[in-house]
Amino acid sequence: MTISVSRPAPRVAQLTIDRDEKRNALNTEVCTLLERALNDSLIDARAILITGAGSAFCSGADLSGGDVGEFYPPMESLFMSIRRAPVPVIAYVNGPAIGAGAMLAAVCDLRVVSPTARFMVPVADMAIGVNDVLVKSFELQMGGSWARAMLLAGASMSAADAEATGFAVRPSMFPRLELPGVGSEAHDSAEFAVALAELCAAKAPLTVRNVKMEFAHASGEPFSEDELESARQAPWDSADIREAAQAVAEKRTPEFRGE
Protein backbone atom coordinates (compact mmCIF):
# COMPACT_ATOMS: atom_id res chain seq x y z
CA MET A 1 0.00 0.00 0.00
CA THR A 2 1.25 3.49 -0.83
CA ILE A 3 -1.00 5.07 1.82
CA SER A 4 -1.06 3.78 5.38
CA VAL A 5 -3.72 4.82 7.88
CA SER A 6 -3.22 4.90 11.64
CA ARG A 7 -4.95 6.40 14.67
CA PRO A 8 -2.28 8.11 16.81
CA ALA A 9 -4.85 9.81 19.07
CA PRO A 10 -8.60 9.70 19.71
CA ARG A 11 -10.60 10.99 16.71
CA VAL A 12 -7.37 11.63 14.75
CA ALA A 13 -6.57 9.80 11.52
CA GLN A 14 -2.98 9.87 10.28
CA LEU A 15 -2.50 9.30 6.55
CA THR A 16 1.09 8.45 5.64
CA ILE A 17 2.40 8.51 2.08
CA ASP A 18 4.47 5.33 2.14
CA ARG A 19 6.75 5.47 -0.92
CA ASP A 20 10.10 6.03 0.75
CA GLU A 21 11.88 4.51 -2.25
CA LYS A 22 10.42 7.34 -4.36
CA ARG A 23 10.80 9.96 -1.63
CA ASN A 24 6.98 9.85 -1.34
CA ALA A 25 6.45 11.42 -4.75
CA LEU A 26 2.85 11.80 -5.89
CA ASN A 27 1.47 10.09 -8.96
CA THR A 28 -2.08 9.45 -10.16
CA GLU A 29 -2.47 6.34 -8.00
CA VAL A 30 -1.11 7.99 -4.84
CA CYS A 31 -3.39 11.01 -5.25
CA THR A 32 -6.42 8.75 -5.75
CA LEU A 33 -5.58 6.52 -2.78
CA LEU A 34 -4.81 9.49 -0.51
CA GLU A 35 -8.11 11.14 -1.43
CA ARG A 36 -9.97 7.89 -0.77
CA ALA A 37 -8.27 7.43 2.61
CA LEU A 38 -9.11 11.03 3.51
CA ASN A 39 -12.79 10.61 2.66
CA ASP A 40 -13.01 7.25 4.44
CA SER A 41 -11.44 8.75 7.57
CA LEU A 42 -14.05 11.50 7.69
CA ILE A 43 -16.62 8.94 8.84
CA ASP A 44 -15.41 9.33 12.42
CA ALA A 45 -12.20 11.41 12.53
CA ARG A 46 -12.36 15.04 13.64
CA ALA A 47 -8.82 15.87 12.51
CA ILE A 48 -6.64 14.49 9.74
CA LEU A 49 -2.84 14.39 9.86
CA ILE A 50 -0.94 13.92 6.58
CA THR A 51 2.76 13.01 6.58
CA GLY A 52 5.38 11.01 4.72
CA ALA A 53 7.24 7.81 5.52
CA GLY A 54 11.00 7.96 5.98
CA SER A 55 12.95 11.19 5.67
CA ALA A 56 10.82 13.10 3.13
CA PHE A 57 7.33 14.56 3.24
CA CYS A 58 6.85 14.51 -0.53
CA SER A 59 9.49 15.08 -3.20
CA GLY A 60 6.99 16.29 -5.80
CA ALA A 61 5.25 14.70 -8.75
CA ASP A 62 6.35 11.34 -10.09
CA LEU A 63 5.68 11.78 -13.79
CA SER A 64 7.67 8.76 -14.95
CA GLY A 65 4.59 6.63 -15.56
CA GLY A 66 2.91 8.45 -18.42
CA ASP A 67 1.48 11.67 -19.79
CA VAL A 68 2.19 14.70 -17.60
CA GLY A 69 -1.33 15.98 -18.25
CA GLU A 70 -2.89 12.89 -16.68
CA PHE A 71 -1.51 13.81 -13.26
CA TYR A 72 -3.14 17.22 -12.86
CA PRO A 73 -6.85 16.18 -12.53
CA PRO A 74 -6.34 13.63 -9.70
CA MET A 75 -4.01 16.05 -7.90
CA GLU A 76 -6.61 18.82 -8.11
CA SER A 77 -9.34 16.41 -6.97
CA LEU A 78 -7.23 15.51 -3.91
CA PHE A 79 -6.63 19.18 -3.12
CA MET A 80 -10.34 19.96 -3.46
CA SER A 81 -11.23 17.15 -1.04
CA ILE A 82 -8.80 18.59 1.50
CA ARG A 83 -10.33 22.06 1.10
CA ARG A 84 -13.86 20.69 1.43
CA ALA A 85 -13.10 18.39 4.37
CA PRO A 86 -15.21 19.57 7.33
CA VAL A 87 -12.36 18.90 9.78
CA PRO A 88 -8.87 20.40 10.17
CA VAL A 89 -6.29 18.80 7.90
CA ILE A 90 -2.77 19.16 9.27
CA ALA A 91 0.44 18.49 7.36
CA TYR A 92 3.34 17.15 9.40
CA VAL A 93 6.21 18.07 7.09
CA ASN A 94 8.84 15.61 8.28
CA GLY A 95 11.37 16.45 5.55
CA PRO A 96 11.62 18.05 2.09
CA ALA A 97 8.34 19.13 0.46
CA ILE A 98 9.15 19.91 -3.14
CA GLY A 99 6.87 21.00 -5.98
CA ALA A 100 3.59 19.13 -5.65
CA GLY A 101 4.67 18.20 -2.11
CA ALA A 102 4.86 21.85 -1.12
CA MET A 103 1.48 22.40 -2.77
CA LEU A 104 0.03 19.50 -0.75
CA ALA A 105 1.35 21.06 2.47
CA ALA A 106 0.00 24.48 1.46
CA VAL A 107 -3.53 23.22 0.80
CA CYS A 108 -3.72 21.78 4.34
CA ASP A 109 -5.13 23.99 7.09
CA LEU A 110 -2.07 23.91 9.34
CA ARG A 111 1.54 22.85 8.97
CA VAL A 112 3.96 21.47 11.57
CA VAL A 113 7.60 21.18 10.48
CA SER A 114 10.49 19.03 11.61
CA PRO A 115 13.98 20.62 11.65
CA THR A 116 14.72 18.87 8.34
CA ALA A 117 11.68 20.29 6.53
CA ARG A 118 12.35 22.33 3.41
CA PHE A 119 9.98 23.80 0.81
CA MET A 120 10.65 24.49 -2.86
CA VAL A 121 8.28 25.01 -5.80
CA PRO A 122 10.54 25.10 -8.90
CA VAL A 123 7.70 25.50 -11.39
CA ALA A 124 9.62 28.04 -13.49
CA ASP A 125 12.43 25.51 -13.93
CA MET A 126 10.06 22.82 -15.18
CA ALA A 127 7.71 24.90 -17.37
CA ILE A 128 4.72 23.96 -15.19
CA GLY A 129 1.66 26.20 -14.97
CA VAL A 130 0.06 27.17 -11.66
CA ASN A 131 -3.42 28.44 -10.85
CA ASP A 132 -4.66 31.34 -8.75
CA VAL A 133 -5.49 29.03 -5.82
CA LEU A 134 -1.85 28.10 -5.30
CA VAL A 135 -0.65 31.67 -5.71
CA LYS A 136 -3.28 33.06 -3.31
CA SER A 137 -2.60 30.36 -0.74
CA PHE A 138 1.14 30.99 -0.76
CA GLU A 139 0.72 34.76 -0.73
CA LEU A 140 -1.67 34.72 2.24
CA GLN A 141 0.13 32.03 4.23
CA MET A 142 3.75 33.13 3.89
CA GLY A 143 3.58 36.67 2.49
CA GLY A 144 3.92 38.09 -0.99
CA SER A 145 7.72 38.43 -0.98
CA TRP A 146 8.31 34.81 -0.08
CA ALA A 147 5.62 33.59 -2.47
CA ARG A 148 7.17 35.50 -5.37
CA ALA A 149 10.70 34.40 -4.47
CA MET A 150 9.63 30.75 -4.40
CA LEU A 151 7.43 30.73 -7.50
CA LEU A 152 9.43 33.10 -9.71
CA ALA A 153 13.00 32.39 -8.61
CA GLY A 154 12.86 28.93 -6.98
CA ALA A 155 13.79 30.09 -3.47
CA SER A 156 14.11 27.45 -0.75
CA MET A 157 12.26 27.89 2.56
CA SER A 158 13.74 26.19 5.63
CA ALA A 159 11.82 24.97 8.66
CA ALA A 160 12.92 28.06 10.59
CA ASP A 161 11.80 30.31 7.72
CA ALA A 162 8.43 28.52 7.59
CA GLU A 163 7.82 29.16 11.28
CA ALA A 164 9.07 32.75 11.10
CA THR A 165 6.70 33.61 8.23
CA GLY A 166 3.75 31.88 9.86
CA PHE A 167 3.54 29.29 7.09
CA ALA A 168 4.11 26.69 9.83
CA VAL A 169 2.88 26.76 13.40
CA ARG A 170 5.12 26.30 16.43
CA PRO A 171 4.50 24.94 19.95
CA SER A 172 4.80 28.39 21.55
CA MET A 173 1.51 29.32 19.87
CA PHE A 174 -0.25 26.77 22.09
CA PRO A 175 1.11 27.33 25.63
CA ARG A 176 -1.55 25.15 27.25
CA LEU A 177 -0.74 22.17 25.05
CA GLU A 178 1.02 19.47 27.05
CA LEU A 179 3.91 18.09 25.01
CA PRO A 180 6.28 15.26 25.85
CA GLY A 181 9.74 16.61 26.59
CA VAL A 182 11.66 13.55 25.47
CA GLY A 183 13.63 12.52 22.41
CA SER A 184 15.26 14.48 19.63
CA GLU A 185 13.90 17.69 18.12
CA ALA A 186 12.54 15.71 15.17
CA HIS A 187 10.77 13.34 17.55
CA ASP A 188 9.31 16.26 19.49
CA SER A 189 7.97 17.87 16.32
CA ALA A 190 6.17 14.62 15.45
CA GLU A 191 4.67 14.54 18.94
CA PHE A 192 3.60 18.16 18.56
CA ALA A 193 1.87 17.39 15.27
CA VAL A 194 -0.18 14.62 16.88
CA ALA A 195 -0.94 16.75 19.95
CA LEU A 196 -2.08 19.61 17.72
CA ALA A 197 -4.33 17.28 15.73
CA GLU A 198 -5.81 15.93 18.97
CA LEU A 199 -6.39 19.50 20.19
CA CYS A 200 -8.21 20.38 16.95
CA ALA A 201 -10.25 17.17 17.18
CA ALA A 202 -11.63 18.29 20.54
CA LYS A 203 -13.05 21.56 19.20
CA ALA A 204 -16.71 22.13 18.31
CA PRO A 205 -17.13 20.33 14.94
CA LEU A 206 -19.83 22.59 13.49
CA THR A 207 -17.84 25.73 14.27
CA VAL A 208 -14.68 24.18 12.82
CA ARG A 209 -16.55 23.35 9.61
CA ASN A 210 -17.94 26.90 9.49
CA VAL A 211 -14.50 28.48 9.95
CA LYS A 212 -12.91 26.24 7.30
CA MET A 213 -15.58 27.19 4.79
CA GLU A 214 -15.11 30.90 5.47
CA PHE A 215 -11.40 30.52 4.75
CA ALA A 216 -12.29 29.04 1.36
CA HIS A 217 -11.92 32.45 -0.32
CA ALA A 218 -8.22 31.58 -0.43
CA SER A 219 -8.89 28.07 -1.72
CA GLY A 220 -10.67 28.49 -5.00
CA GLU A 221 -14.10 29.12 -3.42
CA PRO A 222 -15.18 25.45 -3.40
CA PHE A 223 -18.45 26.18 -1.56
CA SER A 224 -21.70 27.73 -2.75
CA GLU A 225 -23.29 30.65 -0.90
CA ASP A 226 -26.09 28.35 0.29
CA GLU A 227 -23.54 25.92 1.75
CA LEU A 228 -21.74 28.78 3.48
CA GLU A 229 -24.92 30.23 4.98
CA SER A 230 -26.04 26.83 6.25
CA ALA A 231 -22.65 26.27 7.90
CA ARG A 232 -22.75 29.73 9.49
CA GLN A 233 -26.12 29.07 11.12
CA ALA A 234 -25.50 25.48 12.22
CA PRO A 235 -23.36 26.25 15.32
CA TRP A 236 -25.97 28.67 16.67
CA ASP A 237 -28.69 26.04 16.39
CA SER A 238 -26.62 23.18 17.82
CA ALA A 239 -26.61 21.28 21.09
CA ASP A 240 -22.86 21.98 21.22
CA ILE A 241 -23.38 25.68 21.96
CA ARG A 242 -25.49 24.74 24.99
CA GLU A 243 -22.86 22.18 26.03
CA ALA A 244 -20.18 24.88 25.88
CA ALA A 245 -22.16 27.17 28.17
CA GLN A 246 -22.92 24.35 30.59
CA ALA A 247 -19.26 23.30 30.68
CA VAL A 248 -18.22 26.85 31.59
CA ALA A 249 -20.77 26.90 34.40
CA GLU A 250 -19.58 23.52 35.66
CA LYS A 251 -15.89 24.39 35.23
CA ARG A 252 -15.10 21.41 33.00
CA THR A 253 -13.94 20.73 29.47
CA PRO A 254 -16.85 20.58 27.02
CA GLU A 255 -17.56 17.37 25.12
CA PHE A 256 -18.68 18.32 21.66
CA ARG A 257 -20.77 15.93 19.55
CA GLY A 258 -21.22 17.95 16.39
CA GLU A 259 -24.99 18.03 16.87
Image: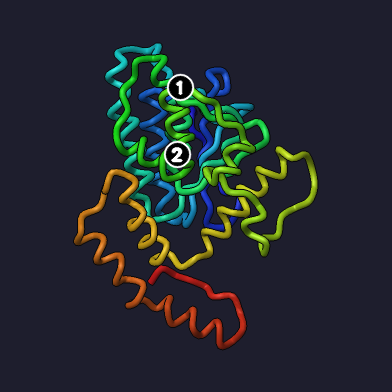
**Mark with earlier residue (2, 1):** 2
Q: Position of residue 109 (x, y in %)?
A: 45, 48
Q: Position of residue 248 (x, y in %)?
A: 55, 83
Q: Residues within 10 Å of mark 2 (few under 14, many from 20)?
A: many
Quadrant containing the C terminus is bottom left
Q: How is the image coloured?
A: rainbow
Residue at 28% over, 20% down = 70
Please give the residue where the numbered disc 1 appears in the rendered image: 153
Q: Would you say 92 lies left or right of 239 here?
A: right
Q: From the viewer's perspective, is residue 245 above or below residue 56?
A: below
Residue at 47% over, 57% down = 46
Residue at 32% over, 28% down = 130
Please give the residue where the numbered disc 2 appears in the rendered image: 106
Spatial separation of the CA atoms under disc 2 and disc 1:
18 Å
**What is the three-letter code of the residue carrying label 2?**
Ala
In which image quadrant can residue 144 be found? top left
Q: Secondary structure at mark 1?
A: helix
**What is the three-letter code of the residue carrying label 1?**
Ala
User: How many numbered marks appear?
Assistant: 2
In which image quadrant can residue 229 be found? bottom left
Q: Would you say 125 lies left or right of 172 here?
A: left
Q: From the viewer's perspective, is residue 247 above or below residue 77?
A: below
Q: Position of residue 129 (x, y in %)?
A: 31, 23
Q: Residues within 10 Å of mark 1 (few under 14, many from 20)?
A: some
Of discs 2 and 1, which sits in the foreground?
A: 1
Q: Residue furthest bottom?
A: 249
Residue at 57% over, 18% down = 21
Q: From the viewer's perspective, is residue 136 above or below residue 229?
A: above
In which image quadrant can residue 78 be found? top left
Q: Secondary structure at mark 2?
A: helix
